[in-house]
Image (cartoon, rainbow, N blue to C red):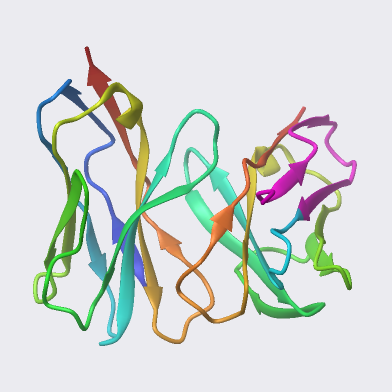
Amino acid sequence: KAGVTQTPRYLIKTRGQQVTLSCSPISGHRSVSWYQQTPGQGLQFLFEYFSETQRNKGNFPGRFSGRQFSNSRSEMNVSTLELGDSALYLCASSLETGTPYGYTFGSGTRLTVV
Amino acid sequence: AQTVTQSQPEMSVQEAETVTLSCTYDTSESNYYLFWYKQPPSRQMILVIRQEAYKQQNATENRFSVNFQKAAKSFSLKISDSQLGDTAMYFCAFRSFTGNQFYFGTGTSLTVIP
């Protein structure tokens, strides 16, 4: 059974550009959550998608957005990149929303903004 | 709001010895879940152990056990017979009964010394 796949694994972007990250959940999982991990702030919740609908959103500016497709694959987009957006972006998938169990994380996308 | 605090940024332990990682949390909720996740260099977050707050018995998973003190809002992880493969970042996490996100601590970097 394939795990959670995040692409690309590494990404370097210039300030002001935009970026799109992809997360393919485990087959059958319908919920995808995104987290930002930085040395200073640790792991912070970005948003959760379930059945193509955003169910919950963390405290991030509107430059951070996401979507989920009918096959449960999710993308997150960051527009007008800032240096502070450099981070490891992790996604996690689960069968259902609102469950405390059964989360599988991907290996993340390391975004560097220069 | 929920907060999770890990006061030990770095720890080391000799192979085969026992080590305890500390975690405290703050919440006004009575029903919640606590977790320890491990993040090796592969970057994938891996669930180590979980505890339901309504259970008084401390959770145990092979060499990993927790000391859950609900009144003190403390949730420490004990690793027995430490192995080189235990070298990783360890994150304590909180999730409320009805919540849609994990709240993570800032992590403890554990090094097992041969």
Residue range highlighted in magenta: A1-23
Residue B1 appearing in the image: no
Image mark count: 0
Residue drawn at the location 86% of the way across and 52% of the way down = A79
Residue drawn at the location 63% of the way across and 47% of the way down = A106
Q: Quadrant of the N terminus of chain B?
A: bottom left
x, y percentage for residue B6? 26, 49
Answer with left or right where residue A14 lies relative to residue B36: right
x, y percentage for residue B11? 21, 29
Indicate yes or no whether the magenta region holds residue A7.
yes
x, y percentage for residue A71? 86, 68
The quarter of the picture where residue A86 lies is top right
- Is A21 in front, or is B55? B55
Residue B40 appearing in the image: yes
Answer with left or right where residue A15 lies relative to residue A112: right
x, y percentage for residue A26? 69, 58
Q: Residue furthest front?
A: A1
Indicate yes or no whether the magenta region holds residue A98.
no
Above or below A50: residue A1 = above
The quarter of the picture where residue A35 lies is bottom right
Above or below A43: residue B79 = above
Q: Quadrant of the C terminus of chain B?
A: top left
Residue drawn at the location 77% of the way across and 55% of the way down = A24
